[in-house]
Amino acid sequence: MDFAMSARAEEFRSEVQQFLAEHVDAETIAAGRDGTIHSAALHRAIAERGWLSGAVPAELGGGGMDPVELCVLVEELQLHQAPADALGVAVVAVSMILEHGGEHLRTAVAPRLMAGEALACLGYSEPESGSDVAAARTRAERRGDRWIINGAKMWTTLAHVADYVVLLTRTDPDAPKHRGLTFFVAPLDADGIEIRPVETMGNERSNATFYDNVVLGDEWRLGEVNDGWAVMKTALKYERGIAGGQFPSPPVIEAAIDWARGACRADGASLIDDDEVRHKLVRAAIDVEVCRSFAYHTAALASEGAMFGVEGSMTKLFASESYKKHCAWFLDMMGAKGLLTHDDPGAHMDGRIEEHFRHAPVTAIYGGTSEINRNLVAEGWLGLPRSR
Amino acid sequence: MRTRYSEDQQAVAEAFGELFAREASTDAVRAAEAGCGFDAGLWRTLAAAGAPGMAVAADYGGGGGSLVDLAVMVYEWGRRIAPVPLVEHAVCARLLAAVGGDWHRDAVAAVAVGELIATLAPGPLDSGGVARLVPAGAVADVVAARRADDVVVTRSRPPATARPNTADLPLADRDLSDAQTVASGAAAEDAWERALSEWKALTAVAYAGLAAEVLAMGVDYTKQRRQFGVPVGSFQAVQHGLADAATRTEGARLLAFRAVCALEAELTGKPTPPIRARPWPERPVSAANKSGKYTAATHPGLSDSRSRSEAGRSDGGRLASMALLFGAESARFAADRALQYHGGYGYSAEYDVQLYYRRAAGWLLQLGEPSAEIARLAQNDLGPKATEAA
């Protein structure tokens, strides 16, 4: 048993740190504040380094980066607050295409995504279905050798900058809900697609996308007809290594320490000497080490070729729930000044804690809510009966 | 990185898992509670199996195993809350083997094979040279403690009665006024800190075992127990409480073993590549909003792991403290959920959950106040308070 990174993985970490020092500066982070947590230059640079294709499994034709190194990459991206939301989506889309896609998707779409020239977004959720993703109602009907798509998707984040949407549709409304689904990869410039912004509390822009008699050739289909659920399962598998989310708290803790060093209590004592503040900073640091232990463990399992499942749910559940808690603690610590946003010149460290406070809730929702993850732990880890 | 047991470690887990399941049933735990919280028969069985000295150097008649191997056994011990002071003994035996060479070599050898039971008094001695509430103090023949700048050891007859306590642990006061010095100065400091870190990390591992077992009790019970015509465990409110407990339990297990591995690596001269105490990089901040106070110089002890090591504490020691606090909290949470979902039966003396609930409180507190542990971690990560520095 050994939790130490290999010398090679540590070398890789230095390489990533050097890369991020060159490519992520205050402007890059600030650019993410326009609501789109994506930097085209950074995305392309990551792809050029081979880290995007590297994250795609070797057996599918990707770089097959060691999962521990992939974990290091994801860790460093988060610690540097790199606006890299498009990376994980691209990796998932490419992996799905390479496993299930036909000739057209494999040759015309996947290479562009892998090179970072094109972006993808995910069209799973709908206005009426989120966690119950298999209840999707967006219709795809076959007309000769074409498909006609009608419906609406929610939370198609990045759609306004992306080239393709990975679309979950219903092709057989009479079949049981998991058996009438089919995936497509739709070009977002197709006629009949409308993208409307969905603004969020965290200032992040997401989208609702609407599909009005969108015509797609069969070459855009991803996987077998009515076999969409099998494709979905592999998508969840690919999401695990790259989705990130294991290290959201460190930038908040860093900002809190910085604040506490500079601030004083009413009695003149430095806040960093306040027992309550010290207690919370220690508790938060412990939570970070728990997250790190989870992340390294799941990466090590993947590296050995062992399939892991519920550990990923545990990691995401613990990381996002503790992140929310930390944000609330440290916002409170700052009092009224904690409320100042980065637009105010007096905001501490660009209003970082305030910004994270507004962002944190979504991390316990997207990519599998805390409740869904608790269900998965209850069923998959504890063997309790299905409760829904 | 290999975060699973090796084949040898798997064999250790299975062998001791069976031994503890057989010899340390909850009937045995209850029987020990009627006495001073110690099962002499179980101790003899463990001694015959080489458990007490498993991770003591072979020079002293120990098994020469690593701290990680020891932790694998301790996890199984924790699962059964077995009424023998295995962790205290193992840690003290390693301490004596490291520094006690001049102190009755034959006594150290007797400790290594479990003929004598050894323990540590984690707290300071009182003015009369008495250590209060010593873990395993009721049964230990050998007690090591800190006295001024020294590590001291005494060998004396144990009282064989414990001070009545929540967790039915063999806590007792011990007179160390005639204890002999076995290490002084920096050597004593290092050895003592090392021993406490091992104790914390191993207790954290035991907590992970306790948590896993009490959680399993809660799961089994809620699968069987029917209310409103269905198993209680089919209710989502119950499932989610158990899922939270499972998540913390697994997190506690991983952090505890990671701490043990880091401590072992420090001993074998292969320290883990530094895990940054300040596990995040310097962040660029736009000039307009930059806090005037934000510079590396305002982060003494935090700018990189090297400066922290110079400040005194190893990654292993830091992780051990963290693992202890998180392990105790997680185990208490798991025991609380399991007890709650047993309904009134969980509160009854007849059911086993309450045994775990009480142990979960005891193991942490016998080491000292959690707030003091947090304060030490704060000093390590944040530097001393102005009042501490003065």
Image (cartoon, coloured by chain):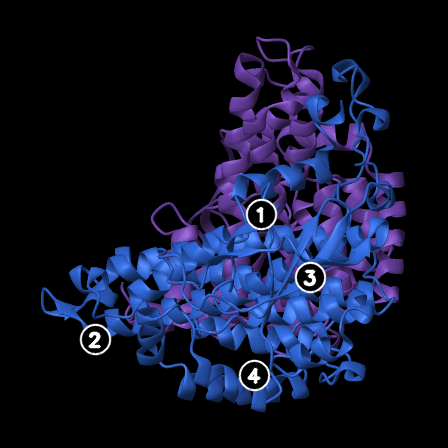
Chain colours: A purple, B blue
The residue indicated by pointer 1 is: A287
Callout 1, which amino acid?
Asp
Q: CA distance from mark 1 to mark 2?
A: 34 Å
Using the image, name the chain to which the residue with label 1 belongs: A
The residue indicated by pointer 3 is: B153
Using the image, name the chain to which the residue with label 2 belongs: B
Residue A380 in the figure: left or right of residue A207? left
Q: Which mark is residue B224?
A: 2
Mark 1 and mark 3 in contact? Answer it, CB < 8 Å. Answer: no
Q: CA distance from mark 1 to mark 3?
A: 37 Å
Closer to the chain start, of discs 4 and 3, is 4
In the image, farthest residue toward the front: B178
Per the image, label 4 sits on a secondary structure element best described as: helix
Callout 2, which amino acid?
Gln
Dot 1 alpha-carbon crowd within 10 angstroms: few under 14, some 14 to 19, many 20 or more: many
Per the image, label 3 sits on a secondary structure element best described as: strand
Q: Quadrant of the N terminus of chain A?
A: bottom right
Labels 1 and 3 within one chain: no
The residue indicated by pointer 4 is: B13
Per the image, label 2 sits on a secondary structure element best described as: helix
Residue B157 in the figure: left or right of residue A105? left
Labels 1 and 4 within one chain: no
User: What percent of the width, then of the height, locates residue A359?
Assistant: 55, 34
Dot 4 alpha-carbon crowd within 10 angstroms: few under 14, some 14 to 19, many 20 or more: many
Using the image, name the chain to which the residue with label 4 belongs: B
Labels 2 and 3 within one chain: yes
Residue toward you, B368 or B202: B368
Q: CA distance from mark 2 to mark 3?
A: 51 Å
Using the image, name the chain to which the residue with label 3 belongs: B
Mark 2 and mark 4 in contact? Answer it, CB < 8 Å. Answer: no
Residue B322 in the figure: left or right of residue B268? left
